[in-house]
Image: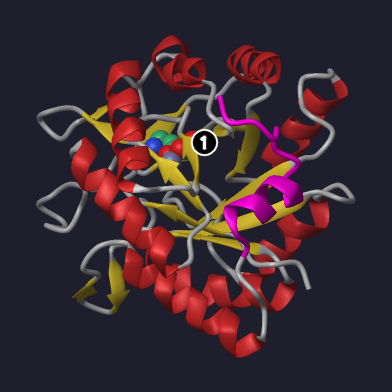
Amino acid sequence: MTPLIITAAICGAEITRKESPYLPITAEELAEEAWKCQEAGAAIIHLHVRDDQGEPTQDIEVFRRAVTAMKARGVTAIIQPSTGGAVGMTAEERMQPVFLNPEMASLDCGTLNFGESYFVNDFPMMRAFAAEMKARKVMPELECFEGGHIANALKLRDEGLLPDHLHFNLVLGVPGAMAASVKNLLFMVELLPPGASWTVSAVGRHQLPLDLATLALGGHIRVGMEDNIYLSKGVLSEGNAPFVRRIAGYAADLGRPLATPGEVRHILSLRQESL
Ligand code: KMH
Ligand code: ZN
C-alpha cells in the first residue's frame, strides 16, 4: 500500500482572521502551525504568505522569512509554495517563490471562475511557470480544478515542460468550478495518465466526505484552512493540525501508513538535495 501523503494547506490567500481567529499569518505563526501539522502527520506544507496587514502577497522576502522560520522551528516536511497566489495577481508576482528553489511548488493548470471573481492561468503563463520550475528541478504539483485542466497539463507534458513523474492535485468544490462529488472525483481520476500520483483538495463541508472517498481509492489528501475552516458544522477548527490528525486517524484505522518527507521524495520523484 502506498503510504498516504498528507498535505497541510495552512493559510491560503482567501480566509481572513475575521472568519477564523486561528488563521496563521506571520512567519512565526506559519512556522508553529507547520510544525504542529508535521507532528500530526503532514509531510507537505502548501504555503501561501501574507503581508503585515494580513493580505495575500507573493513577495519573495516574505516567503523567505516564512521558510527560514519553519526550518528554525524544526519543520522537515516538504515546503510547497503556491504560485497561484490570489486572484488578480500577475504571473511575475506569482512566480517569485520559485526563485527560492523549493523542492515543490503549485502549478495551476487552467483558468476558472473563482467565487465572484476569476483565476487566470492561460497557456503562456502556465508555460512560463513550468519552464522555470523545470530549469530549477522544482516539482510542480499540477492543480486541476476542472477536467479540462488535466488535458492542459498533458499538453504541457507533450511540449516537454514537465518532469517524467506527474503529480496532480484534484481541487473540487471551488465555487464557480467543478463541484465536489464522488462522481466528479472518479471522473477526474480516470482522466489521469498511468503512473501519475494524485492528491485531493475538497473545499468547505465537502472536505471530509471527499477525503474518505480518496482514502478508499488510494489517493493522497490535502487538508487545511486554505480549503476549509470547520471541523464539523459550525465548529471552527483551532488551527490546521486537527484536520491532519483526523485524516491520520482514518489512515491508521485502514492500516495505511503515513508517508514521511523522505518517502514523499521517493513517491513524487523529487530532487534529492534541498537547495
Ligand atoms: N488562491 C487561489 C486563487 C495555488 O495555490 O496554486 C489559487 C490557489 C492555487 O491557491
Ligand atoms: Zn494554494
Residue at figure coordinates x 69%, y 79% from the top left = 216
- Of residues 234 and 107, the one nearer the viewer is 107
Q: Where does the image place residue 126, in percent across and percent down from the top left?
A: 62, 20
Image quarter where ligand 1 lies:
top left
Q: Looking at the image, is 239 positioned above or below residue 250?
A: above
User: Judging from the image, what secondary structure is the residue with disc 1 in?
Assistant: strand
Q: Position of residue 210 (x, y in %)?
A: 55, 71
Q: How is the image coloured?
A: secondary structure
Query: Is 71 on the left-hand or right-hand side of 184?
Result: left
Task: Name the quarter where the C terminus is drawn.
Answer: top right
Q: Is residue 273 magenta?
A: yes
**Looking at the image, residue 254 lies above or below residue 65:** below
Q: Nearer the viewer, residue 130 or 5?
A: 5
Question: In front: 218, or 125?
Answer: 218
**Image: magenta residue range:** 259-275
Mark 1 closeness class: few <14, some 14–19, many ≥20 residues within 10 Å: many
Q: Report the side of 10 relative to 266 (left or right).
A: left
Instruction: Tell me which residue sits at (43%, 55%) in the image.
Output: 8
Q: Is residue 21 left or right of residue 106?
A: left
Q: Is residue 208 magenta?
A: no
The residue singled out by tag 1 in the image is: 112
Mark yes or no: residue 33 visible: yes
Q: Nearer the viewer, residue 112 or 83?
A: 83
Q: Disc 1 marks which amino acid? A: Leu
Q: Residue at x 31, y 75 (%)?
A: 231
For residue 225, say whether it is visible. no
x and y percentages locating residue 88 in the rendered image? 35, 22
Residue 47 percent location from the top left of the image: 40, 40
